[in-house]
Amino acid sequence: MTIIEAGPGAAVGTATAHHEHLIHKHSAHNYHPLPVVIAQAAGAWVTDVEGRRYLDCLAGYSALNFGHGHPALVAAAHDQLDRVTLTSRAFGSDQIGPFCAELAALVGKEMVLPMNTGAEAVESGLKVARKWGYEVKGVPEDRARVIVAAGGFHGRTISIVSFSTDPDARGGFGPFTPGFDVVPYGDRAALAAAITPDTVAVLIEPVQGEAGVVVPPAGYLAAVREICDATGVLFVADEVQSGLGRTGHVLATRAAGVDADVYLLGKALGGGIVPLSAVVADAAVLGVLRPGQHGSTFGGNPLACAVGRAVLELLSDTGPHGMLARAARLGEVLQHALAALVGSGVVAVRRSGLWAGVDVDPRLGTGRKVSERLVRRGVLVKDTHGSTIRLSPPLVITPEELVSAVDALAEVLAELG
Ligand SMILES: *Cc1c(COP(=O)(O)O)cnc(C)c1O
């Protein structure tokens, strides 16, 4: 196959058109994909069905933190494929115990509830928080309430969209699950005022990812911890996107010197190979679940656990050559490159580790338009909320590749200006 670099004016070829037609005709229209049909990928690069190569600066919304086909992760998957892939939780496997022990140790908690998708981790965390509220805190039956933050994103199930503040996420999906109170993100006074004797948990993202990499004001996470401690409420940190390396740390809350009671993990936990998510907490919290009260056929399957263990192994390297240090170093390169664009088509940049939200001057066009132009220049990103571009490249990207992606953004902005 000949490799043709994507460039301005690259035509959408017939193979792309063919697949786009099939996708449009037969796959539900719950997404509006950019005009790229990927056939292959390695590291930070993907190749489309026409043989054009693109630098992947979305990385599966951080599910691909370690890049496409990381050799250690692929080897773990291959190895486990030949042994056993699924046992169901009716039986034990020789992968689930070590996986849960290793994840608990990495997070500094006692127990793990393995699930599959991020939304399931959130749902499971909410069930655990409610049950803890009734059994441990003593909230009267069916009165438990959970406080969440406006602008947050936690998944797509009915209960989760019940507390979403995004009209697209909610519209047409009622009736909604009761028991949630929404407060402004980053506002500690509003949070303190919203707590009632029936509040069992505060569920927040330490950095709001889908909202456009919104970093809370300094001291906010510590204030959430203090408020939860003072009122006997669980602090549930949704680190499905912020966790496992993206911010240069295993956990974004820990980077702020704060420990949550319950951690929700997903995305990168499955190494971009399998869906794998988890609720991580101490036995005093997760111990409220007893047989028959929660479950999942695929949750904690040996294939996912084997890949997850290889992910944890990558994250356990805290030295200068590890993924965490790499994310932190690359984050500074990204910051430096993006700072030069502020005032030249970019209104604001927010960043945490190798993760940035770039607000494009709305007069230049929508984030969608900028993303489409970037595709033509061989860079994959995704817009969010109107004129924001979110950059979350794989941590294996090189500094030169990263700078080239920002250069492409600068060219697109100049072209639109
Ligand atoms: C992506 C995401 C989820 C949902 O994960 P899925 O695997 O898509 O269900 C939940 N919380 C946060 C913070 C996320 O970014």
Image (spheres, rainbow, N blue to C red):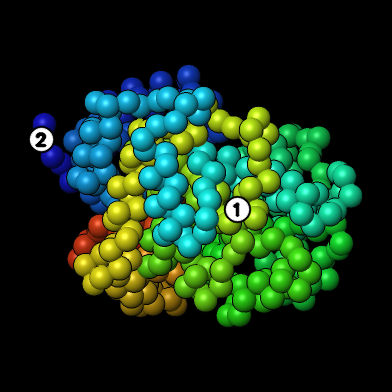
Q: Secondary structure at mark 2?
A: loop
Q: Earlier in the sequence, mark 1 or mark 2?
A: 2
Mark 2 and ligand 1: say if the CB distance to the nearest ligand atom is below 8 Å. no
Residue pictured at 47% horizontal, 26% vertical? 91
Q: Residue at x 66, y 38 (%)?
A: 290
- SS state under label 1: helix
From the viewer's side, name the closer residue of 60 and 85.
85
Could you tell me how far apart the alpha carbons at marks 1 and 2 are, in whole angstroms? 55 Å
Per the rendering, the mark at residue 283 is 1
**Disc 1 residue lies near ligand 1 with CB under 8 A:** no
Q: Which amino acid lies under the numbered mark 2 shown in the image of this protein?
A: Thr
User: Can the viewer see residue 134 in this picture?
Assistant: yes
Q: Position of residue 152 (x, y in %)?
A: 63, 56
Q: Position of residue 151 (x, y in %)?
A: 65, 58
Taking the spot 52% from the left edge, 55% from the top edge, the residue there is: 110
363 horizontally vs 148: left or right: left
Q: In the rendered view of the protein, which quadrant contains the N terminus?
A: top left
Residue 388, image x, y percentages: 51, 60
- Is residue 56 visible to the viewer in this orientation of the structure? no
Is residue 407 shown left or right of residue 400?
A: right
Q: Quadrant of residue 36?
A: top left
Q: Is residue 395 above or below residue 99?
A: below
**Foreground residue, 364 or 70?**
70
Which residue in the structure is indicated by mark 2? Answer: 2
How many residues crowd around disc 1 within 10 Å: few (fewer than 14), some, or many (20 or more)? few
Q: Which residue of the protein is positioned furthest toward the bottom in this rendering? A: 218
